[in-house]
Image: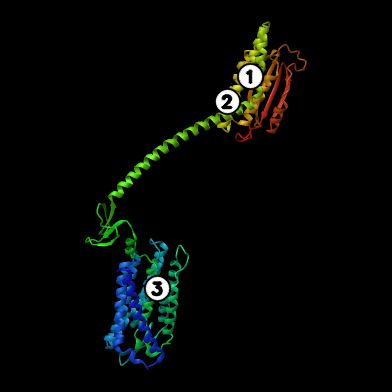
């Protein structure tokens, strides 16, 4: 069905329903003056029209709805509405026997109270993609209450707790009165209508505009007013007799709400594909099980095309068509673009490689600059000593002096080498092992031994990890000690590396003076630089020196509580 035909049918239906409403309004407000407007033939026409209308709506909804759960609920709802209208039609128009009328009246109550239940179930299922535990609980409770209500009505003959029937000589005269349990059942039906409308108002919200779809609440107000007027008897005793069952319009209102949600796509539908296909430029068609084309685009069926067929689960198939010339052009364009991207990728790879090399060079240069700045004074001392060696060689009168100068240069170069090693370790590690400090001192002692001094070292801190700050401070203290004392006055040189019970790591140097007079005076003049002493104090270090026996003892002790290598 195309969109124009659908609009025409909707307008015809609205005109017919409007005509019935106008006739009933005239009868309602004019009394019996225009009773001819409601001749039996007109009542029959009204019933037949609504039977066809609700049946057609149910079939059309089954065709349009895309959600299986909602489709099943709408099918049950339309079946109950059609059954209710047909039973009312038979009871009011066809059957005249009191017993049969009573039977159809009782049977008609079954779909009458199932309609609000299925309406409520449809609202609950709207927007749900899976059966959750909470939804399942709501359905079970609602089904249980509805089943109890229907069972209570159908067994009214046993207890008369819903209706009280009047009998005359064992015959029912079609008059009855409501008992208290009836109002409980009626309240449940009204609650189902109300809860369904509220749920649909909450769920029927446009995601983009954030606006609610107000058709359910608008029609719901009309439904409430109409139902209240009917129950309160505002229409008069002859209204139902003249116009038929007013429940027709209650069901019409329910259908209007659901139809509005379907047309606004708040309930999932599979209609509208015709317009979509006509507006598409892709060659495509959908066929049913028998091979008939149900939907096609305007470019479907042209020559020189490549067809791709995909079968649909449950029957039918989808055919996609691609223009061969278009595919060739696209392929050529993709190949050319692929070549361009390959060239660009090679250029980018070369650029990335060059940038990596530049970064490596910059990193090395930065390290070289840092080493040069840190050891600038040591390099100066080496150059001074080299100049002195050159002068001595030119004079060539003191080989012993030249030998001593060369050995001092060896000691300095050893320090520079180990200091560079410490700087590199500090860049890569937060902690430095005392073994590294021991190796640096041991290599320096090896150089000092060339000066004729007996040297030794003992490390009792194997496995200890020092922060780079403390490790380099220990080595700088040691190097300043080595550079300061006079080699000619030292006979032996020993170093210990220990950790005491208080947690202090202690580096101690023992120097035995050659030819000491044991007078208590220190012939080895030692005074550490102010910069070194300040650094040690800043990090909690303790520098001490004293004379004991024939040895002069110098020590530096530090408790390592630093983290990382932020300061070198």
Q: Are marks 3 and 2 in contact (CB under 8 Å)?
A: no
Residue situated in front as seen by the camera: 38 or 347? 347
Tell me which numbered mark, 3 or 2, is placed earlier along the sequence. Answer: 3
Q: Residues within 10 Å of mark 3 (few under 14, many from 20)?
A: many
Residue furthest top in the image: 397
Q: Residues within 10 Å of mark 1 (few under 14, many from 20)?
A: many
Where 475 sits versus 281, above or below? above
Disc 1/disc 2 C-alpha distance (Å): 14 Å
Q: Report the mark closest to the observer, 3 or 2.
A: 3
Residue matched to label 1: 412
Q: Percent from the top left, x then y, of residue 244?
A: 34, 85
Q: Percent from the top left, x then y, of residue 284?
A: 29, 57
Using the rendered image of the protein, determine whether residue 107 is visible from the camera's viewpoint.
no
Residue situated in front as seen by the camera: 271 or 439? 271
Q: Secondary structure at mark 3?
A: helix
Residue matched to label 3: 257
Q: Secondary structure at mark 2?
A: helix
Tell me the quarter of the picture where residue 297 sits: bottom left
Residue matched to label 2: 421
Using the rendered image of the protein, determine whether residue 59 is visible from the camera's viewpoint.
yes
Q: Quadrant of the C terminus?
A: top right
């Amino acid at each position: 069905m195309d969109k124009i035909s659908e609009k025409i049918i909707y307008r015809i239906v609205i005109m017919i329903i409007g005509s019935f409403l106008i006739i009933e309004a005239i009868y309602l407000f004019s009394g019996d003056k225009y009773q001819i407007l409601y001749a039996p033939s007109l009542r029959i026409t009204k019933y037949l029209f609504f039977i066809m209308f609700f049946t057609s709506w149910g079939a059309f909804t089954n065709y349009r709805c895309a959600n299986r759960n909602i489709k099943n609920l709408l099918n049950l709802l339309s079946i109950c509405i059609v059954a209710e209208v047909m039973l009312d039609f038979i009871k009011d128009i066809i059957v005249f026997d009191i017993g049969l009328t009573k039977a159809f009246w009782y049977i008609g109550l079954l779909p009458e109270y199932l309609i609000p239940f299925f309406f409520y179930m449809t609202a609950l299922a709207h927007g749900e993609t899976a059966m959750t535990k909470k939804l399942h609980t709501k359905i079970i409770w609602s089904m249980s209450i509805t089943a109890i209500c229907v069972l209570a009505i159908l067994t009214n003959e046993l207890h008369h707790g819903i209706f009280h029937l009047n009998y005359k000589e064992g015959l029912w005269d079609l008059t009855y009165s409501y008992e208290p349990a009836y109002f409980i059942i009626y309240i449940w039906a009204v609650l189902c209508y109300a809860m369904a409308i509220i749920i649909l108002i909450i769920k029927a919200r446009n995601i983009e505009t954030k606006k609610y779809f107000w058709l359910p609440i608008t029609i719901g107000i009309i439904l409430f007013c109409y139902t209240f007027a009917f129950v309160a008897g505002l229409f008069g005793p002859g209204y139902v007799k003249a116009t038929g069952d007013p429940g027709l319009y209650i069901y019409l209102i329910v259908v209007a709400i659901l139809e509005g949600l379907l047309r606004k796509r708040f309930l999932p539908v599979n209609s509208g594909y015709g317009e979509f296909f006509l507006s598409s430029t892709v060659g495509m068609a959908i066929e049913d099980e028998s091979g008939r084309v149900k939907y096609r685009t305007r470019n479907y069926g042209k020559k020189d095309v490549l067809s791709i067929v995909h079968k649909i689960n449950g029957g039918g198939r989808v055919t996609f068509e691609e223009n061969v010339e278009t595919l060739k052009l696209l392929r050529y364009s993709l190949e050319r673009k692929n070549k361009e991207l390959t060239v660009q990728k090679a250029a980018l790879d070369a650029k990335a490689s060059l940038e990596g090399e530049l970064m490596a060079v910059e990193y090395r240069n930065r390290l070289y600059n840092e080493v040069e700045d840190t050891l600038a004074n040591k390099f100066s001392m080496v150059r001074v000593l080299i100049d002195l060696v050159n002068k001595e060689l030119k004079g060539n009168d003191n080989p012993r002096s030249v030998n001593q100068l060369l050995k001092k240069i060896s000691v300095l170069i050893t320090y520079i080498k180990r200091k560079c090693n410490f700087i590199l370790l500090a860049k890569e590690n937060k902690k430095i092992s005392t073994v590294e400090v021991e190796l640096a001192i041991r290599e320096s002692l090896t150089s000092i031994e060339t000066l004729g001094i007996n040297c030794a070292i003992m490390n009792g801190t194997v496995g200890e990890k020092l922060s780079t700050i403390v490790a380099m401070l220990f080595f700088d203290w040691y190097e300043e000690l080595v550079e300061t004392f006079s080699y000619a006055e030292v006979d032996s040189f020993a170093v210990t590396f220990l950790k005491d019970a208080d947690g202090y790591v202690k580096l101690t140097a023992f120097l035995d003076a050659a030819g000491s007079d044991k007078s208590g005076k220190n012939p080895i003049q030692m005074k550490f630089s102010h910069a070194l002493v300040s650094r040690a104090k800043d990090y909690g270090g303790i520098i001490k020196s004293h004379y004991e026996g024939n040895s002069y003892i110098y020590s530096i002790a530090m408790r390592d509580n630093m983290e990382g290598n932020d300061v070198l």
